[in-house]
């Protein structure tokens, strides 16, 4: 039984997000726990001023809370800080989460006895793909 932790924006909640949570929870093992950190909207815009966020931070938190695989939801601003604040055994990352903050977070985990697992994205599913599909419906 392990506690698994993952992070993300989770705007335009979609099938790929659900699959991330399902696979992360499986990683925890029977009776394990999944903690999901949702990035604060102001923090997103700090790093990506051009980002188009559809839902407020609170709306995104509430959507993630409703996923049956998720046991706890917290907010975060910087990934390399939140890993120092929570108690968990395994940090689950997506294959594309590689910027400097994620590198520092991963290094911290490895230096402090926490495992790091990278899960590939669900093929053909992303917020970008979803936006394109919605444009095609106009």
Image: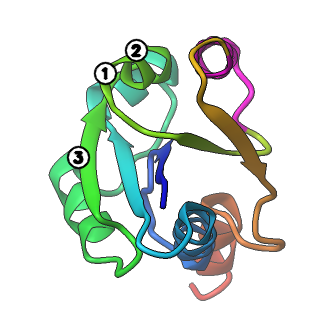
Q: Nearer the viewer, mark 1 or mark 2?
A: 1
Position of residue 27 in the picture relative to residue 61 (left or right):
right
| 122 within the magenta span | no
Label 3 packing within 10 angstroms: few (<14), some (14-19), many (20+): some
Residue indicated by mark 2: 81
- Looking at the rendered structure, the number of numbered marks drawn on it comes to 3
Q: Is residue 41 above or below residue 9?
A: above
Residue indicated by mark 1: 85
Q: Nearer the viewer, mark 2 or mark 3?
A: 2
Residue 23, position as x, y percentages in the image: 63, 70
Position of residue 31 in the picture relative to residue 111 (left or right):
left
Residue indicated by mark 3: 57
Residue 47, position as x, y percentages in the image: 49, 18
* In the image, farthest residue toward the bottom: 137
Q: Which mark is residue 33?
A: none
Q: Is residue 38 above or below residue 102?
A: below
Alpha carbon separation for disc pair 2 and 3: 18 Å
Q: Main secondary structure of the magenta part?
A: helix
* Circle 2 SS class: helix
Q: Which residue is drawn at the image coordinates 56% and 75% (left, top)?
A: 22
Provide the residue span drawn in magenta: 97-110
Q: Does label 3 or label 1 sit earlier along the sequence?
A: 3
């Amino acid at each position: 039984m392990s506690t698994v932790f993952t992070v993300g924006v989770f705007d335009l909640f979609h099938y790929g997000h659900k699959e991330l949570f399902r696979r992360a929870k499986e990683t925890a093992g029977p009776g394990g726990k999944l903690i999901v950190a949702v990035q604060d909207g102001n923090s997103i815009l700090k790093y990506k001023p051009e980002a188009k966020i559809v839902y407020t931070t609170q709306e995104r938190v509430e959507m993630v809370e409703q996923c049956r695989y998720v046991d706890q939801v917290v907010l975060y601003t910087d990934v390399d800080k939140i890993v120092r604040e929570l108690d968990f055994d395994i940090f689950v990352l997506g294959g594309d989460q590689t910027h400097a903050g994620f590198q520092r977070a991963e290094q911290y985990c490895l230096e402090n006895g926490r495992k790091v697992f990278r899960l590939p994205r669900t093929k053909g599913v992303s917020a970008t793909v979803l936006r394109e599909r919605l444009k095609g419906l106009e």
